[in-house]
Image (cartoon, coloured by chain):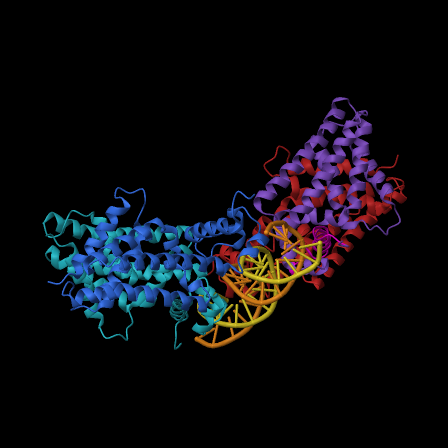
Chain colours: A red, B purple, C cyan, D blue, E orange, F yellow
Amino acid sequence: MKDFNVRDQVARAAVELFAEKGYANTSVQEVVERAGVTKGAMYHYYRSKDDLLFGIYERMLTLQREHLDEIIARGLPTAETLRAACVDVVETSIDALPEGTVFFRSVHMLSPERQAEVTRRRREYNDAFAALVTRGQADGLYRDDIPTALLVANFFSDIHYLSNWYKPTGAETKTQVAEQITDLFLKGIRAT
Amino acid sequence: MKDFNVRDQVARAAVELFAEKGYANTSVQEVVERAGVTKGAMYHYYRSKDDLLFGIYERMLTLQREHLDEIIARGLPTAETLRAACVDVVETSIDALPEGTVFFRSVHMLSPERQAEVTRRRREYNDAFAALVTRGQADGLYRDDIPTALLVANFFSDIHYLSNWYKPTGAETKTQVAEQITDLFLKGIRAT
Amino acid sequence: MKDFNVRDQVARAAVELFAEKGYANTSVQEVVERAGVTKGAMYHYYRSKDDLLFGIYERMLTLQREHLDEIIARGLPTAETLRAACVDVVETSIDALPEGTVFFRSVHMLSPERQAEVTRRRREYNDAFAALVTRGQADGLYRDDIPTALLVANFFSDIHYLSNWYKPTGAETKTQVAEQITDLFLKGIRAT
Amino acid sequence: MKDFNVRDQVARAAVELFAEKGYANTSVQEVVERAGVTKGAMYHYYRSKDDLLFGIYERMLTLQREHLDEIIARGLPTAETLRAACVDVVETSIDALPEGTVFFRSVHMLSPERQAEVTRRRREYNDAFAALVTRGQADGLYRDDIPTALLVANFFSDIHYLSNWYKPTGAETKTQVAEQITDLFLKGIRAT
DNA sequence: TATGAATGAGTGTTCATTCAT
DNA sequence: AATGAATGAACACTCATTCAT
């Protein structure tokens, strides 16, 4: 009976190291050493170093998509849905800060095919989110003198930026930060 | 008389390639080929590949700092100063989109000493900017129920994110985008 | 089952080439070619070219130290011990002429740390040898009008110089040369 | 009017650096920097880095040969001539310790042709010196149970070794050391 | 006489990946 | 399922030397 799972240990080590030193500055040897396995074992589970990186994107994209779909599925009014979606994505991103660091820094290190795949799925997510804003604009909730795309970018930029400044040891709790970021965003876009 | 300058040609090629494919995926050989010089010539002017990267940071940090200082030096009221600073940094960042791409993506590829240097200078810039917000809060212009640091991060995240979505070929002009981003930010932080 | 060992083949090729053409004039490529292995294989066993060189020093220093300790451990009278030590070190040096060539010519090519290490261990060996001479001087066997250090240097210089003139194909056998060098040395230092 | 001579400054810098760090570890750039001249100037006076090295050998070989010839030309008895030659070469070698360091360490760094040239001239010097010993053996002054070549090597090894241990700051003067080394040598080879 | 920018071949080293076991 | 030795292509960088000025 194994007390650990090779696949998961490797994935965990990879996220840590890629976040600490960057994908390019991390060797497969370092990953397997931190994971406590051998190179051969790793290559039994992953086809390439690129696989390790893509795994991080795969998990993040899936997670965010599931969360957003679930929130939309609740069928709440637009304003409440958007607020919930915003708060959730900030909280989720704080829970996965190292993944976020890698996510926003290393897309160009993926194989071209996978870069395309990531871009496609990010766009899908972006579109679903933008649809909420558009609906709110149609309802007169949010300003429409600024392109929806810019409004949405204004929010996603905060998610992107989180790993650049947020420290779990800070004074503000995850939820407080999520509420504050959401509030700033919503104040900015509300119809006047 | 030379029709081009080795130093500048190399710098230009480096920015382009680092933005296109990432620092780690760009070889020195590729840089000198695009610059149309030989490797030896390049190493006559730059000590290392790291120098090429740091040059980009050096120029950006200096430029932004000079702009901010100049705007503050005008001595306008706080609100006008902050607005001018915001619009200017967006415009400046749009003028240097490839540099921005590299700037926000590749700090971790610099030597540790230079990472520290960049961090220090970014913090100085951040502090000077934050001082404007703090002054506005004291004057009752901006909300103070949210930490200044978060308010500032909320703006800088947009700068950071610009190179992820802005296309010079889009419908909006540089100035329009600058005004819109600034407006969203200021609406978000104003006192209620 | 392999008919050769990468580590040893590389070490052998390195000694040969470093003795023939000097450390600086020998490329890693040449070493691996003569050893019949690939560069990657070599770097699997050695961390650097410097390692290859240090290996030679390591082996020589250990060998000489072991021999001297063994001879001293026999507990023979001083004169017999010194004579045995002299004869042995000449013979051992003739057995390892290429190593000797490298040993005395290339210390300055080692990393500073390793130069220090080699110097330290050579001094230890020198001191152990000098102690025999000092004991002989106290017993009135050897002249004491000349510093012990110079007496010892007078002998070690011959070891050092061996690879400059000794040819295994010459008329004198290894043992004869060892006896002759030892005799010249002992005649020079005996009390009058 | 120049306050220094490029040729000589470069030669001086070269000896110093080659002795300190070795020929291979010294770049032409470092030599010209220490000499306080530019690369172009140096290449105006020397054809190659190899020239710099060979210059050291040229000067040493010429100097030693001149000294030996002058001493022999005095026409003193064999024993006095040999003693004078020995004392002189030790003193001369101590006066030129850095040159000696380079001399005995870097022959293999010369071009093959120049290596041959140096070897030839060293052999000539060696032969002239050996002739004195042979004459002394014929006169019954020195032992002839040991090949002349080995007797001579026994002395030259000390010259060779000088730069490995002699410190000008030590307790013994140059002349004392010269007398002591000579005495040890002559005691060792005298007929019994 | 002298400059220093430019060349270009060569260096040691790294590392993702493969494969016999 | 796992090992770790071996591969081989790529990489950043160095440096003696040349040459237009």
- With respect to residue A179, does C63 lie above or below? below
Residue at point 33%, 66% (across, down) = D124
Say whether residue A6 is left or right of residue A92.
left
The location of residue B44, given as percent across then percent down, is 63, 53
- With respect to residue D36, does D112 lie above or below? below
Residue C183 can be seen, yes or no: yes
Residue at point 60%, 56% (across, down) = A24
- With respect to residue B176, does D90 lie above or below? below
Residue C16 figure quarter: bottom left
In the rendered structure, does residue C54 fall within the stretch colored magenta?
A: no
The location of residue B121, given as percent across then percent down, is 65, 37
Say whether residue C178 is left or right of residue B59.
left
- Magenta stretch mostly in which secondary structure? helix
Asked whether B98 or A179 is in front, the reply is B98
In the rendered structure, does residue B25 fall within the stretch colored magenta?
A: yes
- The mark tally for this picture is 0
Say whether residue C163 is left or right of residue D41.
left
Which range of residues does the magenta coloring cover?
B4-29
Say whether residue C29 is left or right of residue A51.
left
Asked whether C168 or B23 is in front, the reply is C168
Residue C99 can be seen, yes or no: no
The location of residue B129, given as percent across then percent down, is 72, 32
Q: Which quadrant does the C terminus of chain B fall into?
A: top right
- With respect to residue D133, does D165 lie above or below? above
Residue B88 figure quarter: top right
Residue at point 28%, 43% (across, down) = D170
Asked whether D83 or A87 is in front, the reply is D83
The location of residue F19, given as percent across then percent down, is 66, 61
Residue A44 figure quarter: bottom right
Asked whether B162 or A42 is in front, the reply is B162
